[in-house]
Image: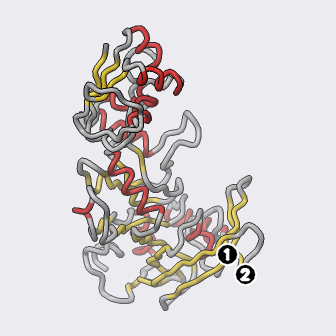
Amino acid sequence: MQTLIVTPNEAGQRLDKLLAKYMNQAGKGFLYKMMRKKNITLNGKKCDGSERLGEGDEIRLFLADETIAKFTGGGAAKPISGYYPKPDIIYEDSHILVVNKPAGLLSQKAREDDTSLNEAILNYLIDSGRMPVEQLRTFRPSICNRLDRNTSGLVVAGRSLAGLQVMNAVFKDRSIHKYYQCIVKGSLKEKQLIAGFLRKDEASNTVDIYPLEVESSVPIMTEYLPLAWGGGFTLLQVTLITGRSHQIRAHLASIGHPILGDFKYGDRSVNEEMKKRYGLRAQLLHSWKLVMPEDLAVPLDYLAGREFFAPLPEKFNRVLEGERMLPRQPFSAKNMSCPNGY
């Protein structure tokens, strides 16, 4: 026999979902049969799997140890393999983490041997004792939003099931406000809202922007505000009204103002010059600010309206200083838009 006590990170999910994760080698038919025969009980009572679990609930498995070992894959849960540096944590509590992803790191694995921010966060939680490795059987903390490999900035991860569910919902319905900063080719001096249609080519993982709707395209809207300019370049604050793959990079490039260092959508000659001057090898695009919805759901309601910031990477500051880009208006220390001294 084995007894499982539902933890805060597992609470809120259905019993059958948790059992399927814990005994991931067992078929659903076997699990439901064991519940019908009371070989699996919840708080000492017969259950059918539809029950919503609460913290402290007791699940009893009246099964042989060999059977449990067989259906759980045998032995202890596997730790996260590979070396991962500690994430740059902006904020952490029992439900979420907000981290500053560096450029060059995947948000999530594309292949089994990839290194990603998601695994770095799991490794941090396990190594710091914030999460026992055994909990990976029934709940796996995960990031809620993704950034391109070479885009830096704020990524939110759910530490608890409730945190993951609430944050996934606000990213999906776009009630969370996302602000980016980037340096683009050309001088822009007025705030603008631009619209168009985006079509993605899955085979090449690229997108095209059109002024009018075409087959398989989706509408997009992007707002930008010039913050500083000089040397034929502009620092922009960008607000995503819609959130599509590569939207900021492709949309700005489509109006003649590609992001510096963007070797997929950018100006090759300008990028080569920036590479020579500043060692620039990735696009200067940074997710610098997140604002939580005012009506954030329980149990994350204590974060309603909260703002999170990630300072601009040093590569931004090198270009801002090197090109003597002057701000259009004084910056507060909080917005972190320009390097110290501007």
* Coloring basis for residues: secondary structure
Q: Secondary structure at mark 2?
A: loop
Q: Nearer the viewer, residue 286 or 197?
A: 197
In the rendered structure, which disc, 1 or 2, sits on the residue that comes first in sequence? 1
- Residue 96 against residue 125 in the figure, above or below: below
Q: Secondary structure at mark 1?
A: strand
In which quadrant of the rendered image does the N terminus lie?
top left
Q: Residue at x 56, y 34 (%)?
A: 112
Task: Count the numbered circles shown.
Answer: 2
Q: Which quarter of the picture shows residue 207?
A: bottom right
Residue 307 image point, x, y percent: 29, 69
The residue carrying mark 1 is: 197
Q: Residue at x 26, y 74 (%)?
A: 334
- Residue 43 against residue 224 in the figure, above or below: above
Amino acid type at circle 1 is Phe
Which of the labelled discs sits on residue 106, or is there none? none
- Residue 42 against residue 211 in the figure, above or below: above
Amino acid type at circle 2 is Leu
Residue 107 image point, x, y percent: 48, 49
On screen, residue 255 versus residue 230, left or right, reads: right
The residue carrying mark 2 is: 212
Q: Nearer the viewer, residue 55 or 240?
A: 55
